[in-house]
Image (cartoon, rainbow, N blue to C red):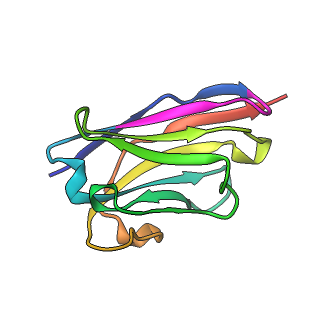
Amino acid sequence: QVQLVESGGGLVQIGGSLRLSCAVSGRTFSSYAMAWFRQAPGKEREFVAALGRSGGSTGYADSVKGRFTISGDNAKNTVYLQMNSLKPEDTAVYYCAAQRHFGAPPVTRSDYGYWGQGTQVTVSS
C-alpha cells in the first residue's frame, strides 16, 4: 500500500514560483510511475507532469512545458513539482498520484490507483 502526502501549496503572485512536495510512504517511489494532476473549480482533473519508474523518463502537459519540472529524491522518498512563471490559470488543487508501471509514465487519470489529498495553489495579482 502506498500513501501520498502533498505539501507546498499556497498563494503566489503572477510570475512567481512554488515547489510542491509529495512524500511517499509504504513503498519506494522508484518502483512506481509518479505524476501530478490538478483540478480547478468546475473543471475535470487534468494531467500536469509525470515521472517514470526510477526517474527514467518524464512527461508534461503542453500548458506547463518549459515552466514546470518534476523530479524525485530517492533518499527522501519524495517527488517534487517545481513550478515557475506561474499564471492565474495554474490555480487549482494539485494532486500527487502513483501507480506501478513499466516504461513511459501514464498521463491518464484512470491509470493511477494511488492519490494524495491535494494541495491548493492560488496564483493572484
84 versus 104 height, above or below: above
Q: Is residue 101 left or right of residue 68?
A: left
Furthest residue in direction right, as rendered: 125
61 versus 39 height, above or below: below
Q: Which one is nearer the viewer's eye here, 45 or 32?
A: 32
Which residue is found at the position 67% from the left and 47% from the top?
67
Q: Where does residue 29 sit, x and y in percent of width and height?
A: 24, 49
Q: Quadrant of the C terminus?
A: top right
Which residue is found at the position 70% from the left and 59% from the top?
63
Q: Is residue 17 magenta?
A: yes
Tell me which corner region of the image, top left, top right, bottom left or bottom right, holds residue 48: bottom right
Q: Where does residue 102 sit, x and y in percent of width and height?
A: 26, 72
Which residue is found at the position 47% from the left and 71% from the top?
108
15 versus 53 height, above or below: above
Q: Where does residue 98 sit, x and y in percent of width and height?
A: 32, 56
Tell me which corner region of the image, top left, top right, bottom left or bottom right, holds residue 116: top left
Furthest residue in direction front, as rendered: 56
Q: Where does residue 109 sit, x and y in percent of width and height?
A: 45, 67
Give the residues drawn in magenta, as a range. Answer: 13-22
**Main SS category, magenta section:** strand
Total tally of numbered discs in the picture: 0
Which residue is found at the position 40% from the left and 63% from the top?
57
